[in-house]
Amino acid sequence: MATSQDSNLFAPRLLVFITRLEDEKHLEELLDDLRIPIFYQCRGKGTAPSEMLDIFGLSGTTRVITAGVVPKCMVREIFEQLEQYLPVRQRGGGIAITIPVTGLQHPVLQMLNDEMRSIAEERINEKMEGDMAAMQEKSEFTVIWVSVASGFSDDVVDAARAAGAKGGTVMKGRRRNSERVGQHLGLSVQDTQEFVMIVAPKAKKSEIMSAICDACGLRTEAHGVVLSLPVDEVVGLER
C-alpha cells in the first residue's frame, strides 16, 4: 500500500517545453533517454505582447511545444538534464514549466507509476552499485563483524590475530531470528551471543575471515556468522 509521501512523489505533472525548432531532435532524444513514456509535440508562435516575447527571446521564430505527463519525482532530474543538453539558460534558448495534473485516466496513471517506479528502482540500484564500487576501490580498511555463541569471542580474536589482525572489540547481546532461518542454519530462535568487531586492512580481509570461519564458523560449536563491510573513512589507525 502506497504511503501519502509515495503518492506525492508520483503525483502527475504536465511538463511543457517551449524550445527552438533546431532543438527538436535533441529534446526528443533526451526524453527517450529518460524513458518518458508519452509526450506530444507541435509547432507554434507566441501571441504574448512583443515586450514579453523579447524578454524570453521568443519573438519572431517558430517554436516547438513539447508536453508530457511525468511523476513529480522525475521533474528535477529532467530539468538538470535539460540544462546540460539544451541552451535553456541562454536568451532565446527556450523555457520549461510544470503544471499539476488534477485528473487522469486510471490506466494511464497506473502505467506512468509502474514505468517510473521501475526507472526509480533501476537508478537506485545503479547508484548503490556505483557507490559500493567506489568505496571498495578507495577504502584501505574493512570491518569484519562476527556473531558467535556466548563464550567463543576469545577464539574469534585468537584466530583473527593469527591471520594478521591487530585485535577486536567484543560486545555481548542477543540474536533474534525466525524459526525458519533457525532450522535452515541450525540455530536456536533466540540465543545469547557475543559479537566481535575487527577493523583490519582490506588486503588481509579474506585471510582473516577464512581463519575465523575455520575456527568458529557455522559448522563449529561457536555457530559463527561472519561478514565484512567496507570502511569509508578512518582515523586513528596505522595505514
Image (cartoon, rainbow, N blue to C red):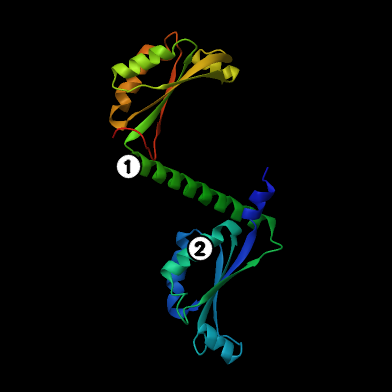
Q: Position of residue 84 (x, y in %)?
A: 42, 67
In the rendered view, tell whether residue 227 sits above or below residue 140.
above
Q: Position of residue 162 (x, y in %)?
A: 29, 16
Quadrant of res 47: bottom right
In the rendered view, tell whether residue 115 sits above or below residue 173.
below
Residue at x 59%, y 17% (from the top left corner): 179
Q: Nearer the viewer, residue 81 or 233?
A: 233
Q: Which residue is label 1 attached to?
A: 138
| Kind of residue at badge 1 | Lys
Label 1, label 2: how far apart the Cα atoms are: 31 Å
Quarter of the figure with the C terminus: top left
The kind of secondary structure element at disc 2 is helix
Left-right relation of 61 to 70: left
Residue 166 visible at all: yes
- The reply to whether callout 1 and callout 2 are in contact (CB within 8 Å) is no
Q: How many marks?
A: 2
Residue at x 58%, y 87% (from the top left corner): 52
Q: Which residue is label 2 attached to?
A: 78
Q: Nearer the viewer, residue 29 or 148?
A: 148
**Of the numbered discs in the image, which one, if any, rests on residue 110?**
none
| Kind of residue at badge 2 | Ile
The kind of secondary structure element at disc 1 is helix
Quadrant of res 210: top left
Residue 18 visible at all: no
Q: Position of residue 183 (x, y in %)?
A: 54, 14
